[in-house]
Amino acid sequence: MLNIVLFGPPGAGKGTQSQKLIDKYNLVHLSTGDILRSEIASGTKLGMQAKELMDNGLLVPDDLVIGMIRNKLEAHASASGFIFDGFPRTVAQAEALDQLLFTQKTQISAMVALEVDDKELENRLLLRGQTSGRVDDANTEIIRKRIEEYNTKTAPVASFYQAQGKFKKINGIGSIDGIFSCICDVADNI
Ligand code: AMP
């Protein structure tokens, strides 16, 4: 199985690159942000619990997202692999993911980290906000909050995978196809 954690701050290009990866390698895309937005759209209890935190650029509690991922892994038990996009975002989530994959007799193959500086992220997210309809892309204050959440809670997840020899970093500034080809180099050499 090919199980890739696509890592990086909000606006790094994870969604765009995930789409290309699932097409090329026939993987299942698990984006916790997308799953949460669809829970909100359906008006579920989980969606209601997450909405205010998301609108304010804060992470939702670990147990909620870990439960979501557990359900999705079980629902796709015969998949040839997964792209984890926007998950894990805390070390506790990374530990839980290792455990969940272990019970399915598999593991993370690599973590690919897209590196983009904060100013570029802010510009990209504000631009995306003009069309995404996402409350959390709409103003600079919330965007900065999301980047701060990333820097304090999510960035340490890189060390977790580094300790397992699975961390690969890639420059996230450049053409979409150029960045994709760097990610494929990683995926093809696992
Ligand atoms: P994203 O679409 O990945 O940018 O996520 C949008 C928002 O959903 C984040 O700012 C968080 O509020 C929430 N979220 C998504 N994934 C996670 C996660 N793995 N852990 C906690 N909160 C998350």
Image (cartoon, rainbow, N blue to C red):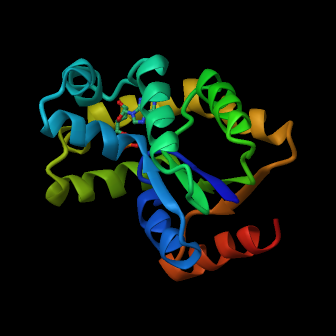
* The C terminus - image quarter: bottom right
Give the image quarter of residue 170: bottom right
Image coords of residue 20 (percent x, y) = 48, 74
Residue beneath the point at 45% across and 26% down = 67
Along the line of sight, the residue nearer the viewer: 14 or 125: 14
Left or right? Give the position of 81 relative to 111.
left
Along the line of sight, the residue nearer the viewer: 120 or 52: 52
Image coords of residue 69 (percent x, y) = 48, 36
Image coords of residue 48 (percent x, y) = 18, 22
Residue beneath the point at 37% across and 28% down = 145
Residue beneath the point at 50% across and 40% down = 74
Ligand 1 positioned in quadrant: top left
Image coords of residue 21 (percent x, y) = 54, 70
Left or right? Give the position of 32 relative to 156.
left
Please, is residue 60 above or below residue 11 in the view?
above
Left or right? Give the position of 21 relative to 75.
right
Find the residue positioned furthest to the front. Answer: 78
Please, is residue 118 above or below residue 178 in the view?
above
